[in-house]
Image (cartoon, grey):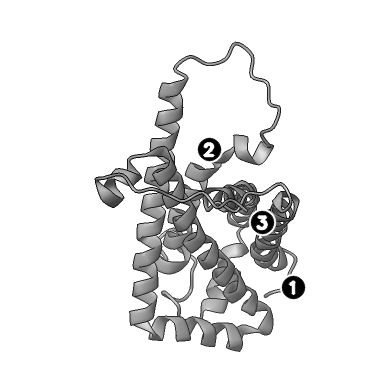
């Protein structure tokens, strides 16, 4: 594995962040936080298959631990903000380095996932806002029978009985799969773990994780549409 030491500029952490390497490292570290949240959130969502009582108890447990809940939300919010800021700044740096587009775009080593990062990211950001308004605030689905986490099971079922809503969630999970695949692999590279011997394993890990997450999240709206969860 790579053993290259990271040298901080004389201006310290802020100076290091001004470098391309610094921005990539911030993206990697904030990406780790978000991947951890996504996996945990998926595991929680899958408890809906244990039945209404178990799922409602899980939702109530989360909301009763307000200190932990708001602390996790704060860390996640800061991570998302820094991740987006770093991504935008890196995109601007790349554009300044190549102000004119190539006459013909030829993709040799890039993947479809990597080429869709800059548009899948904003769409996922919009989805996150909608998701919060949908299930956390309850502002975009007037048929939600109970506010907040009260009777969370029924809220989820009612929400996903709307076909357009369920399809939007499934579409967003497809984008999340692509984003995670390239993001996890890039994260491992930015952390200095790239090595010819381990690269195939890292790519398989990234692909497997992204696929499991997409299937895990999509299983809920699909099950509601099929009447398995009702």
Q: Are marks 2 and 3 in contact (CB under 8 Å)?
A: no
Q: Which residue is mark 1?
A: 228
Query: Is residue 89 something one can see in this rendering?
Result: yes
| Residue 228 placement: quadrant | bottom right
Q: Please say if 83 is above or below 212.
A: above
Which residue is depicted at the point 52% across and 48% down? 190
| Distance of label 1 from label 2 (alpha carbons) | 33 Å
Indicate whether 19 appears above or below 177: above
Q: Is residue 213 left or right of residue 152?
A: right
Q: Give the residue drawn at x 31%, y 44%.
A: 9
First along the sequence among labels 1 and 3: 3
Numbered label attached to residue 62 = none
Label 1: few (<14), some (14–19) or many (≥20) C-alpha neighbours in 10 Å: few
Residue that carries the numbered disc 3 in the rendered image: 210
Most foreground residue, 160 or 48: 48
Distance of mark 1 from mark 3, alpha carbons? 24 Å
Q: Mark on residue 119?
A: 2
Give the percent coordinates (x, y) of residue 155: 53, 72
Q: Which mark's residue is nearer the viewer, 1 or 3?
A: 3
- Determine the secondary structure under disc 2: helix
Tell which of 149 and 99 is nearer to you: 99
Real-space CA distance between mark 2 and mark 3, rounded to the nearest whole angstrom: 17 Å
**Which residue is rendered at x = 69% and y = 32% of the image?**
109
Residue 139, horizontal then vertical, whole percent: 40, 61
């Amino acid at each position: 594995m790579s053993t290259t030491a990271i040298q901080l500029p004389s201006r310290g952490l802020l100076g290091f962040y001004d470098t391309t390497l610094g921005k990539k490292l911030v993206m990697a570290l904030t990406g780790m936080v978000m991947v951890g949240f996504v996996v945990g959130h998926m595991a929680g969502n899958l408890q809906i298959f244990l039945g209404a009582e178990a799922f409602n108890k899980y939702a109530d447990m989360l909301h009763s631990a307000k200190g932990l809940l708001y602390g996790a939300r704060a860390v996640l919010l800061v991570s998302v903000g820094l991740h987006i800021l770093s991504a935008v700044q890196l995109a601007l740096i790349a554009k300044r380095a190549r102000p004119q587009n190539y006459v013909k775009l030829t993709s040799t080593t890039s993947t479809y996932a990597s080429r869709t990062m800059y548009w899948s990211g904003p769409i996922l950001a919009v989805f996150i806002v909608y998701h919060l308004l949908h299930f956390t605030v309850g502002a975009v689905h007037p048929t939600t029978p109970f506010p907040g986490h009260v009777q969370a099971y029924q809220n989820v079922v009612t929400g996903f009985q709307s076909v357009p809503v369920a399809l939007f969630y499934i579409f967003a999970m497809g984008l999340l799969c692509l984003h995670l695949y390239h993001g996890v692999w890039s994260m491992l590279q930015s952390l200095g773990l790239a090595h010819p011997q381990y690269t195939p394993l890292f790519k398989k890990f990234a692909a497997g994780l992204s696929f499991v997450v997409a299937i895990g999240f999509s299983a809920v709206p699909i099950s509601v549409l099929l009447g398995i969860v009702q």
